[in-house]
Amino acid sequence: MKGTVFYLVSGHGGPDPGAMGKIGKNILCEDEYAYDITLRFGRELLRHGAKVYFIVRDPHDGIRNEQYLQSSTDEVCYPAEEIPLNQVKRLKQRVDAINNLYRSEPIPTYKRCIELHVDARETKKNIDIFFYYHPGSRPGERLASTMRNAIERKYQLKQPGRGYNGDVSTRALYMLEKTLPSAVFIELGNINHFRDQQRLIYENNRQALAKWLCNGVIEDFKKSN
Ligand SMILES: [Zn+2]
């Protein structure tokens, strides 16, 4: 992956914890789980020689192995900007950080922005990992589809008979539209659903997920050559 550049964004953070789930007395905050999986995902990419920028950063939290990740509000936006509460300002701050980094390295190479979320859903159903790309972005579509298919194959291998319904679709999200690098937005599950929570709370599951995501990216990178 030498020469590739990734801008990884974990959803929410700072004053915005994102969606919240509950297990007993424990509150699960979306931003903390998205952050932990993003760090693990970035570490896998680094191990493969990629250059990785973590756009949302917590100066105090690294990769954590606990089941219940403590919520904090001290996350900042790259390099060390306070995150505003206002959603439009928050997203613009991220886009600016990514686009400045993108422009600062004019070498034409494989550069991608990947954003991870674990939102809550109104439905009582569990949600398989699914993907959005911006309408009309062919690199975004290819990356999303390749990552999706890599995950499907992993499930077939590790949990035969489970099935996998995660899909790929377009959505005109601000972060997908405004970022200069081609971008993919990933939903890792429903933070309110018991089954999806298992994917999040166990560190070995978070780690497996990070590896699967990385495998998909590597496959897409190979297609780009
Ligand atoms: Zn979210």
Image: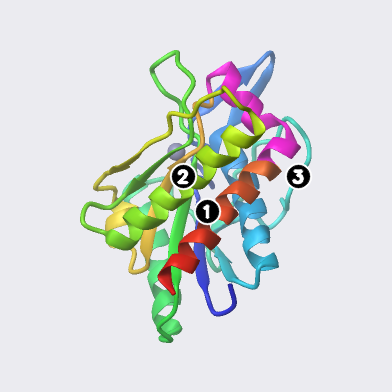
Asked if 82 appears above or below 110 in the picture, the reply is above
User: Is label 1's Cβ within 8 Å of ligand 1?
Assistant: no
Residue 151 lies in magenta, yes or no?
A: no
Task: Residue under label 2, please give it.
Answer: 149
Q: Which mark is residue 48?
A: none
To which quarter of the image does residue 130 belong? top left
Left or right: residue 38 versus residue 43 is left
**SS state under label 3:** loop
The magenta segment:
192-206
Residue in the picture at 66% in, 59% down: 44
- The first of marks 1 and 2 along the sequence is 2
- Toward the left, the furthest residue is 136
Q: Give the Cα separation between the discs numbered 1 and 3.
A: 23 Å
Front disc: 1 or 3? 1
Q: Give the Cα separation between the discs numbered 3 and 2.
A: 28 Å
Marks 1 and 2 close (CB-CB < 8 Å): yes
Q: Position of residue 39 (x, y in %)?
A: 64, 54
Q: Give the Cα separation between the discs numbered 1 and 2.
A: 8 Å
Quadrant placement of the C terminus: bottom left
Asked if 16 appears above or below 222 in the picture, the reply is above
Residue in the picture at 54% in, 80% down: 3
Marks 3 and 2 close (CB-CB < 8 Å): no
**SS state under label 2:** helix
Name the quarter showing ligand 1. Answer: top left
Task: Residue under label 3, please give it.
Answer: 64
Asked if 164 appears above or below 153 in the picture, the reply is above
Task: Residue under label 1, please give it.
Answer: 216
